[in-house]
Amino acid sequence: MLAQNLKTARELGLADVEADALVTVLGMLERGEIARDQFHMGQFRHQCRTPACICGWAHHVSGGTAFPELSSQYGPMMLYRRLSNSLVGLFRLTSARGSGGEITPAQAAIALRNFLTHGEPRWAEAMAVCESAPGR
């Protein structure tokens, strides 16, 4: 297996626990451990309070220590103010509320790997790669 060339938490502008949680979520997405019906890039949590998006899953797998703002009613606004433009883009914080349901876990995995490797999600690339792949 090839070594991963991921940026450090500091290079990504994150706390170590946040970077670690995102790496954990990446593995879960790539292994198919997060089912399509458990994933929605337009909300942090489903109505039943289970995690939905990349950020919500990172918060969940870290026991609430990654992106702790999600515990607040105003979490998205607080996150927006704290995070870099690249993370805002990864989490789609400027997208229309509720949009993102069409993004699959496989597409999110590509965007997350792009972010962890290059410092930007490159959503257009992630969406194009998965759309053209057979069987998706």
Image (cartoon, rainbow, N blue to C red):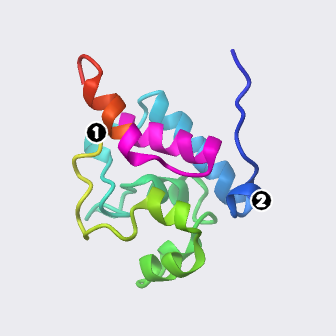
Number of marks drawn: 2
Q: In the displayed structure, would residue 91 be above or below residue 78?
A: above
- Amino acid type, mark 1: Arg
Residue where numbered disc 1 is placed: 36
Q: Please indicate, yes or no, whether residue 105 appears anywhere in the rendered image.
A: no
Residue where numbered disc 2 is placed: 10
Residue at horizontal 36%, vertical 57%?
50
Along the viewing direction, whichever of 106 and 25 lies nearer the viewer: 106
Label 1: element kind = helix
Residue at horizontal 31%, vertical 46%?
38
Where are the magenta residues, as a range?
106-125
- Residue 18 location in percent, x, y? 65, 58
Crowd tier of the residue under label 1, counting other residues whose Cα lies within 10 Å: few below 14, some 14–19, many 20 or above? some
Is 135 on the left-hand or right-hand side of 87? left
Dominant secondary structure of the residues highlighted in magenta in the image = helix
Position of the C terminus by quadrant: top left
- Residue 110 location in percent, x, y? 46, 37
Task: State which mark lies toward you, 1 or 2.
Answer: 2
Position of the N terminus by quadrant: top right
Residue 124 within the segment the image draws in magenta:
yes
Label 2: element kind = helix
- Residue 84 location in percent, x, y? 59, 68
Quarter occupied by residue 108: top left
Measured Cα–Cα span from mark 1 to mark 2: 31 Å
Q: In the displayed structure, would residue 106 be above or below residue 111?
A: above
Tell which circle, 1 or 2, labels the residue nearer the N-terminal end. Answer: 2
Q: In the displayed structure, would residue 64 be above or below residue 136?
A: below
Residue at horizontal 61%, vertical 56%?
62
- Amino acid type, mark 2: Arg
- Residue 92 location in percent, x, y? 39, 62
Quarter occupied by residue 64: bottom right
